[in-house]
Image (cartoon, rainbow, N blue to C red):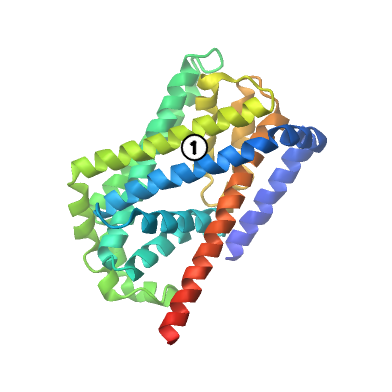
């Protein structure tokens, strides 16, 4: 928690410094122009979460149960990760716990959520690859050595994550049940026994992996539409190619800053750098990031309220 609060302080300070450098008045003017873009951004984010919920349900191995359950929990999962200092981990644990409370066996919920995260990471790599490919065709990106280095580092990270799972990463979780219980009292032996076996079983369902991957990739691509709308609202005719590069590389920068709550400061720096490749001013890049944060705030607050409502209701029912 202390590290999370420190991250918030550093990230918030970085945003203030960036805003002062780019011009607070200029950023405010761009935000006034782009204010109407927040509503469609929220709508697009909800569609992204809906597609991600379908992919999550498929990754867990359920085809028939109500999708609304997965959508609500996916929204809560996103809200916890984006709004609280949990280093993009707490929301996933909350999601596993809520699935288990609703009848999904603990090992299936844990393994399915791990697989869902893996599919999301792989599709983000493909999305970033699309962005780099689009950038390479422009004058700004042609012949840039950092493009290949960035791709190599990302590919190595994704490959290592998948290899670790196959080598028995979740067996370590199974073996560490006693220490885990001290940190997470709700974790039981039954909820983690067989995690690795379940994950390997889900890995073998190639059709489910392909469908879940396609859904996640479409969700990533919807972010390009959001970026294009926000830039257009500010009077920037960036074009779809530039919007693809800005969205994919901006989100890659955000993911790289996963240890900082909400990637505060990291996202803003990423957008300033990538937008600069297309001649978009720093104040407009920061305003673009603020539009994205506004839609995250709207969805995040709703998700946290839903989470607390669900937990409060569960406690009341248990007390009865």
Give the quadrant of residue 246: top right
- At x 50%, y 65%, the residue is 307
Give the quadrant of residue 212: top left
Q: Position of residue 46 (x, y in %)?
A: 49, 46
Q: Position of residue 33 (x, y in %)?
A: 73, 32
Q: Secondary structure at mark 1?
A: helix
Is the residue 179 above or below the residue 225 in the image?
below
Give the quadrant of residue 73: bottom left
Residue 56 located left or right of residue 239 = left
In the rendered picture of this protein, how many numbered marks are placed on residues? 1
Residue 268 can be seen in this image: no
* Residue under label 1: 252
Q: Farthest residue to the right: give it.
A: 25
Is the residue 275 above or below the residue 105 in the image?
above
- At x 62%, y 47%, the residue is 264
Q: Position of residue 132 (x, y in %)?
A: 46, 24
- At x 44%, y 28%, the residue is 149
Residue 73 located left or right of residue 191 = right
Q: If the image is split into quadrants, where does the N terminus sit?
A: bottom right
Q: Position of residue 107 (x, y in %)?
A: 26, 64
Q: If the image is split into quadrants, where does the C terminus sit?
A: bottom left
Residue 214 can be seen in this image: yes
Front residue of this view, candidates 132 and 317: 317
* Mark 1 nearby-residue class (10 Å; few <14, some 14–19, many ≥20): some
């Amino acid at each position: 928690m202390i590290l999370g609060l420190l991250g918030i302080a550093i990230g918030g300070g970085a945003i203030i410094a960036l805003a002062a450098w780019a011009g607070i008045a200029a950023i405010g003017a761009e935000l006034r122009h782009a204010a109407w873009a927040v509503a469609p951004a929220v709508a697009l984010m909800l569609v992204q979460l809906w597609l991600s919920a379908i992919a999550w349900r498929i990754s867990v191995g359920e085809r028939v149960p109500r999708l609304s359950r997965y959508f609500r929990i996916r929204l809560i999962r996103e809200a916890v990760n984006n709004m609280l200092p949990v280093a993009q981990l707490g929301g996933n644990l909350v999601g596993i716990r809520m699935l288990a409370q609703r009848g999904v066996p603990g090992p299936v919920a844990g393994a399915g959520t791990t697989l869902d995260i893996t599919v999301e990471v792989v599709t983000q790599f493909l999305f970033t690859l699309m962005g780099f490919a689009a950038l390479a065709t422009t004058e700004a990106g042609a012949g840039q050595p950092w493009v290949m280095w960035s791709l190599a580092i990302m590919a190595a990270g994704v490959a290592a994550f998948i290899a670790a799972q196959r080598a028995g990463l979740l067996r370590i979780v199974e073996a560490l049940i006693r220490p885990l219980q001290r940190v997470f009292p709700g974790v039981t032996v039954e909820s983690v026994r067989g995690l690795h076996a379940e994950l390997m079983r889900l890995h073998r369902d190639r059709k489910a992996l392909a469908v879940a991957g396609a859904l996640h990739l479409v969700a990533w691509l919807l972010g390009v539409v959001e970026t294009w709308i926000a830039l257009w609202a500010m009077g920037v005719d960036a074009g779809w190619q530039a919007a693809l590069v800005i969205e994919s590389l901006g989100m890659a920068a955000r993911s790289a800053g996963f240890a900082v709550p909400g990637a505060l400061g990291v996202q803003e720096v990423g957008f300033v750098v990538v937008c600069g490749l297309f001649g978009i001013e720093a104040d407009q890049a920061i305003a673009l990031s603020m539009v994205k944060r506004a839609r995250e705030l709207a969805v995040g607050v709703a998700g946290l309220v839903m989470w607390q409502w669900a937990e409060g209701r569960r406690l009341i029912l248990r007390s009865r």
